[in-house]
Amino acid sequence: MPFSRHYRILQWRIKRRLDHYEARITDLLYGRVKAKGRLWILWWFLQGFEWLFGLIVSWRLWLYQNRILKQQYLGCMVVVIGNITVGGT
């Protein structure tokens, strides 16, 4: 059974490393750490997506406010739960 023991150790190491990366990225996104080194590149990459998403949402809102895009009435009540279409849970 040495293979299964080595497999469990490898699996544990991979999980530990992924947990570390997740914690670092979360800290970066919430501003708890300053971006430096490779995190700085990731921060600018994510900032670009944030600005692009904000621009698209603002543009879409402007289109609805100026009645270029029309609202559609469904004839029933609609309940929206979170931002599932954007990746929320």
Image (cartoon, helix red, strand yellow):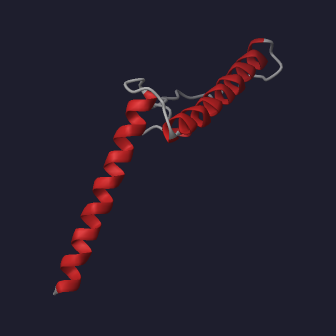
When the figure is inspected, residue 31 is found, relative to residue 18, above or below; the finding is above
State which quadrant residue 46 falls in.
top right
In depth, the one of 58 and 29 nearer the eye is: 29
Q: Residue at x 75, y 15 (%)?
A: 62
Residue farthest toward the front in the current orientation of the protein = 37
Farthest residue, direction left: 1
Farthest residue, direction bottom: 1
Q: Residue furthest top?
A: 66
Q: Is residue 28 left or right of residue 60?
A: left
Please provide percent x and percent y for residue 16.
28, 54
In the rendered image, the vertical position of residue 33 relative to residue 87, given as above or below: above
- Residue 17: image location, x then y, percent: 33, 54
Q: Residue at x 79, y 23 (%)?
A: 69
Q: Is residue 59 left or right of residue 46?
A: right
Q: Quadrant of residue 59?
A: top right
Image coordinates for residue 12, horizontal then vertical, percent: 24, 63
Q: Is residue 42 left or right of residue 9?
A: right
Q: Quadrant of the C terminus?
A: top left
Please name the residue shown 57% across and 38% down the image.
41
Q: Is residue 52 above or below residue 85?
A: above
Position of 88 compared to 56: left or right? Answer: left
**Nearest to the observer: residue 48 or residue 70:** 48
Q: Residue at x 83, y 20 (%)?
A: 68
Image quarter where the N terminus lies is bottom left
Residue 58 screen position, x and y as percent: 70, 19
Q: How many numbered callouts?
A: 0
